[in-house]
């Protein structure tokens, strides 16, 4: 596995060469939760054959042809793949892998295994400070309690200083008043907090979008007060723009793209019904050219996910300087004794 410094240098090569910095790699569409604001748990792709670890190793080498990338291993629930530590190791050979999980299947052994395999960071999804509300939204009794256990387990399992533990909240119609409490609860467990707004294309409904007044000023005030609130302030400043018509100039296919659990590639996760290449069967050059072609004349404003807004922040000087701590450095801590663990 390449050193942390070598991968960061290679990530700069990716950025300076105009290649995508981020890919969301859906390792499975199977899920043990029944979240009301996501339809992946009943997606037919959950029944499709999934790539082997060797396929991931091949794909990681292809992607590395143009430099290192930030690779989000997601789903579905990634830990339903019992070979996830081996998948992480295959990606970490060249790239910076992250995992997003609901936390239900996390125990001390699997946490140690993925951290030892070279995981760069992990995000555990928690949307409410109230246990009953979180469990109801996620369709699983006990989900809130187990998610916080997972945060604690991952915090204790870190092997390298750079490994980050995040709590990831989805801004919904009824949880804006819960977010700051979540930040404080995450800080108590030596974890960061990040947020992204609900995307209506997950279930083709805007039912769960936040509609109760301006969001961005409140989030920016929280950012100032909470040192572990890691979301980029430029990204947070555009939440209201997204909720009132959408953010234009999407860089899907140029700054980021999606890989499905079958290896199919689309310019973003919401465009997966129209893949433009396949990671396993196509060459890296065909993939690069197909992404560039498909990204032209993209006028979509349907999402403001982290994989879009945070990555697009890296392409403007002011927000680039604010985004660097998100990816590489320690922004600080409300608890000085824990500060050194947040890398």
Image: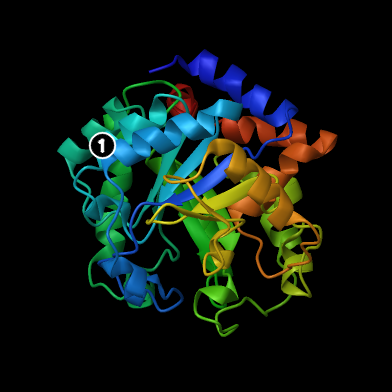
Image side of residue 289 versus residue 5, left or right: right
Rendering coords of residue 311 (x, y %):
66, 44
Residue visible at 78% across and 56% down? 296
**How is the protein colored in the picture?**
rainbow
Q: Is residue 267 visible?
A: yes
Q: Quadrant of residue 158?
A: top left
Q: Quadrant of residue 297?
A: bottom right
Please determine whether, in this image, residue 278 is positioned above or below residue 142.
above
Image side of residue 278 versus residue 9, left or right: left
Rendering coords of residue 1 (x, y %):
38, 18
Q: Is residue 153 visible?
A: no
In the image, 281 versus 208, the foreground residue is 281
Residue visible at 62% across and 47% down? 256
Q: What residue would you read off at disc 1? A: 85
Rendering coords of residue 244 (x, y %):
78, 75
Q: Quadrant of residue 146?
A: bottom left
In the image, 232 versus 253, the foreground residue is 253
Rendering coords of residue 180 (x, y %):
55, 56
Please determine whether, in this image, residue 74 is positioned above or below residue 132.
above
For mark 1, give the secondary structure: helix
Please determine whether, in this image, residue 221 is positioned above or below residue 163.
below
């Amino acid at each position: 596995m390449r050193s942390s410094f070598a991968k960061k240098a290679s990530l700069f090569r990716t950025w300076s060469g105009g290649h995508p910095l981020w890919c969301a790699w859906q390792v499975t569409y199977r899920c043990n939760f029944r979240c009301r604001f996501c339809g992946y748990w009943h997606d037919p792709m959950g029944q499709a054959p999934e790539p082997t670890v060797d396929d991931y190793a091949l794909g990681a080498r292809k992607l590395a042809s143009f430099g290192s990338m930030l690779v989000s291993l997601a789903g579905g629930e990634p830990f339903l793949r019992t070979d996830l530590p081996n998948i992480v190791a295959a990606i970490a050979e060249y790239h910076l892998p992250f995992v997003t999980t609901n936390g239900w299947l996390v125990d001390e052994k699997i946490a140690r295994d993925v951290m030892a395999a070279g995981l760069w960071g992990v995000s555990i999804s928690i949307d409410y400070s109230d246990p009953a509300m979180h469990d109801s939204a996620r369709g699983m009794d006990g989900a809130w309690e187990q998610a916080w256990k997972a945060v604690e387990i991952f915090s204790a399992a870190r092997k390298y200083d750079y490994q980050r533990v995040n709590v990831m909240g989805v801004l919904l119609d009824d949880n804006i008043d819960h977010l700051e409490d979540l930040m404080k609860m995450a800080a108590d467990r030596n974890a960061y907090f990040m947020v992204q707004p609900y995307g209506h294309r997950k279930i083709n409904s805007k039912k769960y979008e936040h509609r109760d007044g301006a969001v961005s000023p409140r989030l920016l005030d929280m950012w100032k007060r909470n040192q572990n609130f890691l979301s980029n302030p430029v990204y947070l400043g555009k939440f209201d723009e997204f909720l009132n018509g959408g953010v234009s100039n999407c860089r899907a296919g140029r700054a980021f793209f999606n890989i499905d659990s079958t290896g199919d590639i689309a310019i973003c996760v919401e465009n997966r019904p129209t893949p433009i290449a396949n990671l396993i069967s196509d060459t890296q050059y065909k993939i690069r050219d197909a992404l560039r072609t498909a990204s032209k004349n993209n006028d979509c404003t349907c999402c403001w996910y982290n994989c879009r807004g945070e990555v697009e922040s890296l392409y403007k000087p002011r927000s680039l300087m604010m985004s660097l701590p998100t990816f590489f450095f320690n922004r600080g801590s409300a608890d000085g004794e824990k500060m050194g663990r947040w890398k």
